[in-house]
Image (cartoon, rainbow, N blue to C red):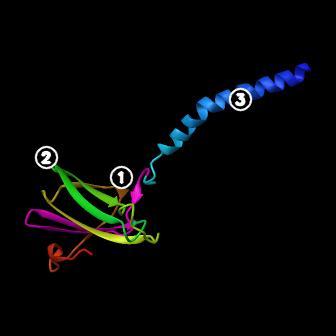
């Protein structure tokens, strides 16, 4: 056998051994990538409607969900300081794995209320990512507490 043939066969054997040991690890790296796609800052599609009444803030907003079957929930975390620092955490939850749903981007409303001073500093996070948002004040004649959320 020629020397060049031996070098080629040895190179193929070494490449085979390397692929055998490292290819499964490469696949594992791709499986660890999060599938939510929510990386970095998120922009809310509409301004948040805000009302301050009797020491309570009410925010109503809208986020885009990947399907109509996704659900949206919101909670406020108030950190004690003055002015209070408030984080509104909005979570977009996927449907159960056995649910079949058309992939149509759907706007979903959320509402959150919390007690804090009028000067409270508010941050909004969507699925853990910081969100850019604007605020629209609701007139006092409208009662946001009674607003239904579909």
- Residue under numbered circle 3: 15
Q: Earlier in the sequence, mark 1 or mark 3?
A: 3
On the rendered structure, is 75 left or right of 20? left
First along the sequence among labels 2 and 3: 3
Q: Residue drawn at (83%, 26%), measured in percent from left and top?
A: 8
Considering the whole magenta stretch, tell me its main secondary structure. Answer: strand
**Toward the viewer: 3 or 64?**
3
Q: Secondary structure at mark 2?
A: loop
Q: Name the element at disc 1.
A: strand
- The x and y percentages for residue 20 are 63, 31
Q: Quadrant of the C terminus?
A: bottom left
Residue at image point 42% right, 69% down: 100
Q: Residues within 10 Å of mark 1 (few under 14, many from 20)?
A: some
Return the residue found at the far left: 54
Question: Which residue was labeled with disc 1?
Answer: 130
Q: Nearer the viewer, residue 124 or 96?
A: 96
Badge 2 density bin: few <14, some 14–19, many ≥20, Cα 10 Å: few
Question: What is the distance, in whole Å, between disc 1 and disc 3 at their CAs?
Answer: 45 Å
Discs 1/3, front: 3
Q: Quadrant of residue 97?
A: bottom left
Q: CA distance from mark 2 to mark 1?
A: 21 Å
Side (left or right) of 125 relative to 23: left
Task: Quickly name the residue at label 2.
Answer: 80
Q: Earlier in the sequence, mark 2 or mark 1?
A: 2
Given contact means CB atoms under 8 Å apart, are the residues at marks 1 and 3 in contact?
no
Q: Residue 116, located in which quarter of the rendered image?
A: bottom left
Label 3: which secondary element: helix
Highlighted range, magenta = 39-64
The residue located at (36%, 66%) in the rendering is: 70
């Amino acid at each position: 056998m020629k020397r060049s043939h031996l070098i080629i066969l040895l190179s193929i054997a070494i490449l085979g051994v390397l692929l055998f040991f490292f290819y499964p690890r490469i696949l594992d790296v791709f499986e660890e990538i999060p599938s939510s796609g929510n990386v970095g800052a998120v922009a809310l599609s509409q301004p948040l409607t805000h009302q301050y009444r009797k020491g309570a803030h009410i925010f109503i907003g809208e986020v885009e969900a990947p399907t109509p079957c996704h659900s949206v929930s919101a909670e406020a975390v108030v950190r004690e300081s003055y002015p209070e620092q408030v984080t509104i955490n909005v979570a977009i939850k996927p449907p159960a794995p056995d649910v079949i749903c058309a992939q149509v981007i759907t706007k979903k409303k959320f509402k959150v209320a919390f007690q804090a001073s009028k000067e409270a500093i508010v941050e909004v996070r969507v699925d853990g990512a910081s969100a850019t948002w604007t605020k629209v004040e609701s007139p006092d004649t409208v009662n946001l507490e009674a607003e239904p959320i579909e």
